[in-house]
Amino acid sequence: MVENVFSCRLRAWRAEHNLSQEQAAELMHVSTRALQTWESGTQFPRLDTFLLIADTMNVSLDFLAGRESIVVH
């Protein structure tokens, strides 16, 4: 399976912050199973959840989606 930018950035953010999937899911107000499917690239979140993830990670939607290569606050 080809890696997608969203999955890679989500996993990298979680690793950077030393968070388990359970901890990250709790911060994002989603289920651990949902986070697992996003990190594996098998599913993507709904738009409203995508916005919540970007806010939790303190990044732009464009960065999270791979349209920007640097974090812009």
Image: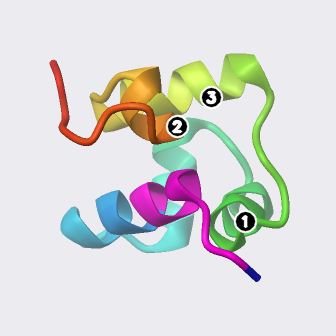
Q: Quadrant of the N terminus?
A: bottom right
Along the viewing direction, whichever of 70 and 53 lies nearer the viewer: 70
Q: Amino acid at mark 3?
A: Phe
Left or right position of 68 against 51: left
Residue occupying image coordinates x 74% and y 53%: 31
Label 3: which residue? 50
Residue occupying image coordinates x 30% and y 73%: 15
The answer to which quarter of the image holds residue 13 is bottom left
Q: Does dot 3 land on a helix, a strand or a loop?
A: helix
Q: How many residues crowd mark 1 within 10 Å: few (<14), some (14–19), many (20+)? A: some
The answer to which quarter of the image holds residue 48 is top right
Left or right position of 65 against 12: right
Q: How many marks?
A: 3
Q: Quadrant of the C terminus?
A: top left
Q: Are marks 1 and 3 in contact (CB under 8 Å)?
A: no
Q: Is residue 49 magenta?
A: no
Along the viewing direction, whichever of 43 and 25 lies nearer the viewer: 43
Disc sitting over residue 41 in the figure = 1
Left or right position of 48 against 62: right
